[in-house]
Amino acid sequence: MEPAGVSAVTVGVTYSLSDAQNPASGTAPVIKPSATGTAYSWILLVALKVTGTAATAITNRKIAFATVVASGSAVFFADQPTYREPATGNHPTSSGSNGPATPTPAGASAPGSYAAVTTSAALWDATSHSTGSLGRNGDFIELLGAIDHTSSQGSGQDALPDLDLTFDES
Amino acid sequence: MFTWVATFRDGTVLREDDPTSALCSHEYDSHDHGLACIKDKDVQSLGWFLDERLFAGVLIPAGAEPFLIRRNTINLRTGPKSMLWSAGWKRGEQSEYVTIYPDYSVICSETEP
């Protein structure tokens, strides 16, 4: 069941092997592969939420990195119309390749495929939905953090670029 | 900040910052709510005021659908980041619009924003 949303604006999200929005450093971390390969976080679901109604509609929801991500790290995304709780059952298995390699979707209601977030805004949901009702507007973005063996990241948290979510309102 | 203005085919001029206008009174009372009003097909042109100067906007062909789109960006770490405005018209596969950036530069295009 879809829980009430918790704001990620200005707070952000932390990729981990848990169902927490921002676990402390060292809590359920994604372990960098000790040999060639890519490890993935559990999924994270983010969506736009209407907090004040208007006589408009939102379309063209897009996602991008604000700056270029460091080599060896990545965030992957997919359109996700259905809520599914982050859990080990929908955690993509690690890849035997660097890249970071694109993860293979796992678990029930998995998206067809994931794509890497880049600095070019990429569409996740173009559907028009009225802002006349409070609550989630449009589909979720299903996010995954990834790190491969080539990453220069040492112990501690890897500070990824900010995520920019854009949308049209008319 | 620029102020959108719409010229209707009956000669009426509507400024978005004029809540006393008869055309504004029921739904054109704020930036957000004004967007729906502009979908009136009797709009002849969309332009904007900046420092009390009227800039030519987009001429709307008869029967075409005028639009205003606010293009928002939210940065998950820092919050709302930028807001661009596009105005134009579309009819079938045809469209033309202008985008106004925060520094008031104007970009024209003939494809759907």
Image: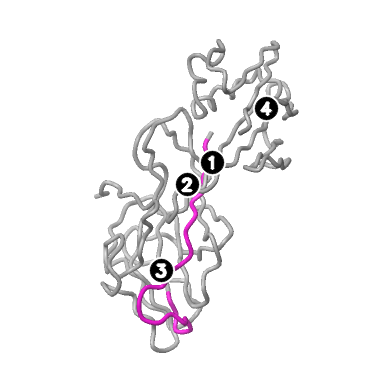
Protein chain holding label 2: B
Query: What residue did someone put label 2 on?
Result: B80
- Distance between the alpha carbons at the discs numbered 4 and 1: 22 Å
The residue at 52%/28% (across/down) is: B31
- Residue type beneath disc 1: Asp
Residue A149 highlighted magenta (yes or no): yes
**Mark 3 sits on what residue?**
A145
Closer to the chain start, of discs 2 and 4, is: 4
Q: Bounds of the magenta span?
A: A147-169
| Residue at the (51%, 41%) spot, across then down | A59
* SS at mark 3 in the image: strand
Q: Most prominent secondary structure in the magenta stretch?
A: loop
B84 left or right, relative to A13: right
Give the CA separation, mark 2 to mark 1: 14 Å
Residue at numbered disc 4: B49
On the same chain, marks 2 and 1? The answer is no
Residue wearing tag 1: A168
Q: CA distance from mark 2 to mark 4?
A: 25 Å
